Image: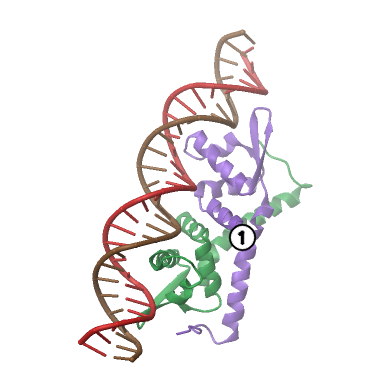
Chain colours: A green, B purple, C red, D brown
Amino acid sequence: MTNQMNLLFATLADPTRRAVIERLVAGEAPIKELAAPHDMALPTFLRHVERLEEAGLVTTRKEGRQRIVSMTPEAFAPVEDWLTTQKRIWERRAGARGSHVQRRTP
Amino acid sequence: MTNQMNLLFATLADPTRRAVIERLVAGEAPIKELAAPHDMALPTFLRHVERLEEAGLVTTRKEGRQRIVSMTPEAFAPVEDWLTTQKRIWERRAGARGSHVQRRTP
DNA sequence: GGTTTAGTTAGCCCCATGACTAACCAAATG
DNA sequence: CATTTGGTTAGTCATGGGGCTAACTAAACC
């Protein structure tokens, strides 16, 4: 769905959220630890985690009084697929003739 | 630069702009032709092309009274690199032990 | 059981972004 | 030269997203 792509790209367009991902590929962590490096109010940070979860990039579970966040790497697939598809089409086309410039219905 | 990543992801988060890319991988085209499938006012569409250009995903040149738009596929590199880097780190970590669940400094 | 500690909820502000209309240029054409 | 045609500029509007504080809940701890 194109809607999911919007969500994924929009979610990854934020540096805080990308930083969270970068931290999570090294292993799951509770909110507080994730929030530590980011100089912002906790509720604000919480919203970022929520957005990551809405995009399916992350899942969370409650453990005692803390919430553990972990990655869902499969969620990247649509983005990766889209990128490689575009690249493939481009390369097929570019490879066909010399370099570039063509098409353009007047 | 992280700023460029924000720009790239944010630019690709819009379905109209992704559709333009999808059209351009098949070859360059003038604004009007690009705009045709999108049911919106021309100025609005123009803005989208401007944003693509600001992100470096596209270049344009004037040819007579029409403006020709063409792809800049190298511009995707930062996004692709980031994605594969995250994936690589994840897989290295996940491969190390059984499957998942680990870390979490209390 | 009172106090930290870790989240959570609610409500507010501000700015950027997408979309629109109206009006304006400048090639191309009759 | 008048008129299309293809953009371009300017200005308005509404929404959503990021950020904040204040106040509340619920585990853990002493």
The residue sitting at 69% across, 54% down in the picture is B74
**Viewer-proximal residue, D14 or B21?**
D14
Q: Amino acid at mark 1?
A: Val
Where does label 1 land, which residue?
B79
Q: How many circles with numbers are drawn on the protein?
A: 1
Indicate the position of residue A24 as horizontal and vertical percent values. Answer: 52, 74
10 Å crowding of disc 1: few (<14), some (14-19), many (20+): some
The residue sitting at 50% across, 38% down in the picture is B44
Indicate the position of residue A80 as horizontal and vertical percent values. Answer: 58, 63
Indicate the position of residue A37 as horizontal and vertical percent values. Answer: 51, 71
Q: Would you place residue C25 above or below residue C20 in this image?
A: above
Asked if one can make out residue A106 in the rendered structure from this viewpoint, the answer is no
**Viewer-proximal residue, A101 or B93?**
B93
Horizontal arrangement in the rendering, residue C12 relative to residue A75 (left or right):
left
The residue sitting at 62% across, 73% down in the picture is B88
Q: Would you place residue B24 above or below residue A56 in this image?
A: above
**Viewer-proximal residue, A95 or B79?**
B79
**Viewer-proximal residue, B41 or A25?**
A25
Q: Would you place residue B51 above or below residue A58 in this image?
A: above
Asked if one can make out residue A24 in the rendered structure from this viewpoint, the answer is yes
Image quadrant where one finds the C terminus of chain B:
bottom left
Element type at marker 1?
helix
Chain letter behind tag 1 = B
